[in-house]
Image (cartoon, grey):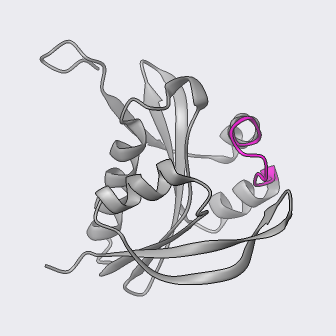
């Protein structure tokens, strides 16, 4: 799919169990403390919003979001390393927010490592605000790392 300017556009497709092995490999390539394939399978099986990011018929990333009642929780968001720093993560994030809005969520939550300033900046520039801290939430090389809890209100 090309835009009028000739630039390729991202598209999104549902993630199915058949994609998990590929996505798990991508996850491990991009994150030192990665999700297992079984976590991705459980998310797909549980009916979470699991989206593949497609560019020129190639999977370049994915997002996983859970919705319950009127709240959405972005659980995982990844653009594969060769495709990073091109604005694709922002487009994926906005796509997930649109999905949450269509499902009548009033707020979107996520956790992010403070040691990942690119992700923190992305979320702040996308309207997320820090609302809390989860102590020792993530595995890290030095034991545990806190998580910033961020939220974006979807109610206008």
In the visual, does 30 lie left or right of 38? left
Residue 98 part of the magenta-drawn span: no
Using the image, determine if residue 150 lies above or below residue 50. below
Q: Quadrant of the C terminus?
A: bottom left
x 70%, y 42%: residue: 27
Find residue 148 and report its horizontal and vertical position in percent.
55, 73
Q: Residue at x 70, y 55 (%)?
A: 40
- Quarter of the picture holding the N terminus: top left
**Residue 152: x percent and y percent?**
33, 73
Q: Is residue 94 left or right of residue 60?
A: left
Residue 28 falls within the magenta-colored stretch: yes
Camera-side residue of 104 and 118: 118
Q: Position of residue 105 (x, y in %)?
A: 33, 78
Q: Is residue 35 left or right of residue 107?
A: right
Q: Residue furthest top?
A: 6
Q: Splitting the image into 4 quarters, where does residue 145 fall? A: bottom right
Residue at 45 percent of width and 74 percent of height: 150
Number of marks in the rendered image: 0
Decide: is 138 above or below 32.
below
Q: What's the residue at 34%, 79% (across, down)?
A: 107
Q: Nearer the viewer, residue 150 or 9?
A: 150
Query: What segment carries the magenta color?
Result: 27-37
Q: Position of residue 19 (x, y in %)?
A: 66, 39
Residue 24 drawn above or below residue 67:
above
């Amino acid at each position: 799919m090309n835009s009028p300017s000739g630039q390729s556009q991202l598209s999104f497709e549902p993630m199915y169990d058949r994609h998990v092995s590929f996505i798990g490999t991508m996850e491990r390539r991009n994150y030192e403390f990665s999700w297992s394939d079984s976590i991705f399978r459980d998310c797909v099986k549980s009916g979470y919003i699991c989206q593949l990011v497609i560019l020129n018929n190639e999977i370049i990333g994915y997002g996983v979001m859970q919705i319950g009642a009127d709240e959405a929780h972005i659980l995982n968001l990844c653009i594969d390393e060769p495709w990073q720093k091109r604005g694709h993560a922002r487009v994926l994030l906005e796509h997930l927010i649109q999905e949450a809005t269509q499902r009548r969520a009033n707020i979107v939550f996520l956790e992010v490592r403070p040691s990942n300033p690119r992700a923190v900046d992305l979320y702040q520039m996308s309207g997320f605000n820090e609302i809390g801290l989860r102590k020792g939430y993530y595995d890290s090389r030095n034991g545990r790392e806190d998580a910033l809890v961020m939220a974006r209100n979807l109610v206008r």
